[in-house]
Image: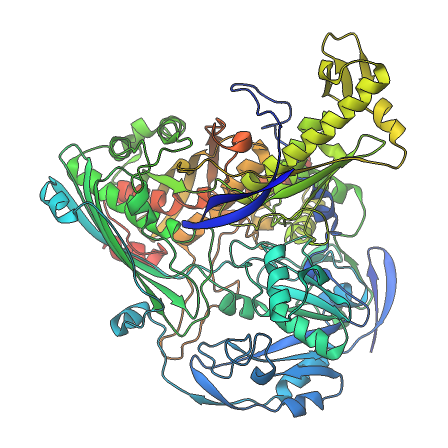
Amino acid sequence: MARLVRTEAVVEGRTEIRYTLVEDDDTPEWEPGERPALIGEPAARVSAGPRTAGTARFTTDIVLPGMLEAGILRSPHPNARLTGLDIEAALAVDGVRAAIGPADSPGGEEGGVLTGSPGYAGAAVAAVAADSRAALRAGLAALQPRYETAGFVVDLDEALGRQDLFSDPSEYERGDVESGFADSAATVEATHRMPAQLHSALEPHCAVADWRPDGVTVWTSTQSIYGIRDDVAGTFDLDPERVRVISEFVGGAFGAKFGSGAAVPLATELSRRAGRPVRLVLSRREEQTTTGYRTPASITLKVGADADGRLRAIEGEGAIGLGSDGWTYPIMEPAKSVYACPNVHTIVVPLRQNLGPAAAFRAPGVMEGTFALESTLDELAEQLGIDPLELRRRNHSENDPATGRPYTSKRLLECYDRAAELAGWDSRDALRSDGRIRRGMGCASQFWWGGGGPPAYAEVRMGKRARATVTVGLQDLGTGVQTACAIVAAERLGVPVESVTVRAGDTSLAGHGPFSGGSMTMASIVPAVRAAGHKVRQQILQLAGDMFEIGADDLTLENGEIRSVDGALVHPITEVTGKLGNAWVTGSGSRGPNPDGMAVNTWGCQIATVAVDTAIGELRVEKVVAVHDVGRIINSMGARSQVAGGVLQGLGFALMEERVVDPNTGLVVNANLEDYKMPTIADLPEIVCDFVGEPDPHLAVGVKGLGEPPIIPTAAAIANAFAHATGVRLRETPFSPRRILEALA
Amino acid sequence: METVITVNGQAHTVAADDRLTLGELLRDRLGLTGTKMACAEGTCGTCTVLLDDRPVLSCLTLVAACDGRSVRTVEDRGRLLDDLREAFTATDGLQCGYCTPGQLMSAVALLERNPSPTTAEVVAAMAGNLCRCGAYAGIVEAVERVAVR
């Protein structure tokens, strides 16, 4: 039986009420302390074969018979009005099969993908599909757009000065900060600034659309196949069942690949018009200027504490630049939610600029806010003469300080202890010296959500050779969620992980799955897979009971064998499944809701060791110790990889990543992978990774997400390590040699 | 003009205009989509293939310059490439896998000319291949596993 259940889901800090279909589920949870087979062992990712053989088909690799290549004409001006566009001339070019402008835009002339009033350099104005790239170039050139240009704002401070708000400021208040500061023995106020960080996934946004009279198939590189399905169905007024979205392999996303963007609706409309399949792949310049970024931010925090370092008040003012779209990312969430502090008042001003749309980027808002808060707390610790880690322990909160709700689990104190031990925190002062090279060590706390939730559905089937297939309606961005699904199914079925095939990334398959974001995917899907696997297990044991004339309750399934509890009977599983012929034993499972009235969060602590060459302003991160509490670990190798990736992107944010916009022209001047610096293999620090690993007792399977947590504290830990090494604070990213030399001067 | 080019051991005669790049030839004409494009302007290393045993960026290499030469891609077969595939898998030297073909080809080039590189030599040889997912630790470990010790 299936029931409709009302549930609260927290997505990147926004609480959503959802109604969700949930199947009855009698899968027993593992006993506390039980160490189930395969769970938490290191496992190679199930898709490594095609990914290393070059046979993995990414959207950019899709080729269909008769396929056209499409491209987009984009505004070169940051603010303009289109006064002329020659669609007919483009259509007259040999090989051009379709050309559309704002009047033909999917989504309508107002608010559609193509605009006659481009508000940033790179806004899409027209699109063309042609037989070849050469014909496409000629078709785009024939459009001959004419513009009337207007004034523009790209600078964050200028936007703030003009008070051009994207939406209402976001304000939060508890207690009374004035009385809190009056009670404080020490106060620190600091402003931290950071430019936009670009996602820079190596596979650009892209889509292949094949419009047929009976429906449309869209291949695209996305974080949400079902989100794309609904977008396409809505934009083109189609039955969602007639829209098939395929995203078998995704070449990185990091938050930028939600929504249909420009590629999906334009490829679909051009295919509809031309009657041919259409491929649209963005150029690197388009990718770096039109598909999103972590918002540039300015965050001012004033913190006050008593003589023992216990926080009495936090007051925060922040501004973020959303460009032409986005939402108010939760930059004040750390100030509000990480520590016990009775008096908090924050306000965030979201600003409009003549730049492309912002997009969620791995821990949007929280990473920026953590850099500001954790840096400011270190200044407070120094002023009070308290060890920075001890200051954080003293402000530990047993309940969610914003809501008073109890946590489903929180083992942050264990993270501090373990990280301190692994890093040698207690002897950190021995690193310091007065020489040219100065070393130091700094810490930072990590807070995020990541509890997952419904809706998520899975099907598991097992055939005659006792090999299993798991079908889930999600997409794997490279996080390893498919491997986690295989492990959890294999455990229930008593077979090796390698004998499980995972099918995903196709809305025509069974099972609606979650989007990939908010560190929610694995915690959402894994309980559904486990429930489905358990149903298959029960059926196979029932069949075995019938065959061997023994009660199914007296049988278990492990290591490829069916065994009686007393050990008298042992048969390979294939002895039962071999009787299936070409039938399958199948089971379906769904994700139930998380407990009401509790806060579900992930926690962690990172400690960075840095070496600063004071002569040339070079900051090298030598080591990052990362200890996170994300509940039960399903695949220890995959989990370590997630941490390493997050730490490296955090390191890039701290040391080198910066979108540079020319205020005179409104153009991004480093929209490529050479002038936009990001970490290479030569920037890799030693990363020491550990997990608390205890299952969350209130969540199905005890699992929480790990996509976002590791990026969150890295920049703050590096800034704090720099201050420990040099006695000087860095309050603006990236910590370039120029900034470092200026700070040390 | 016509160019004779050997790809993974097979000779092809290609009628190409002067502007056709090696990457376009491989992906669009020969269907060898294992070689990926991420920037198509020579900045990321993703499209690395071997031209007469040396790593080149296929997005910047003109087919017209490849006459009589030999190209190897991730679709090639061979013991070293297989060992590297296995090692990348075992060390989790990949996440999304989009950069992996280029990483593998840079590693092949390194180990063919220097079968026993130091860690610093591995890092130097692989520094032109970006991995945005940050699988670098696994990549270094994988190359070192296959290196002759």
Along the line of sight, which residue is nearer the eye, A46 or A701? A701
Q: Quadrant of the C terminus of chain A?
A: bottom left
Residue at screen point 84% across, 31% down: A465
What scheme was used to colour the molecule? Answer: rainbow
At horizontal 66% and vertical 68% (from top left) the residue drawn is B60
Using the image as rendered, state which of residue A566 and residue A646 is in the foreground.
A566
What residue is shown at x 35% (from left), y 42% (from top)?
A: A717
x then y, percent, for residue B45: 61, 58
Give whichever of A730, A140 is nearer the camera.
Answer: A140
Q: Nearer the viewer, residue A295 or A502?
A: A502
Q: Quadrant of residue A273?
A: bottom right
Count of numbered marks: 0
Residue B39 visible from this viewpoint: no
Is A284 above or below relative to A566?
A: below
The answer, for residue A741, to whether it is visible in the render is yes
Q: Residue at x 64, y 71 (%)?
A: A236
Q: Position of residue A411 (x, y in %)?
A: 39, 29
Q: Quadrant of the N terminus of chain A?
A: top right
The image shows residue A101, relative to residue A492, as above or below, that is: below
User: Residue B144: where, in percent of width, then height?
Assistant: 63, 37
Q: Residue furthest left?
A: A182
State the image quarter where residue A529 is shown: top right
Residue A262 in picture, x, y percent from top left: 58, 70
In the image: residue A273, left or right of residue A650: right
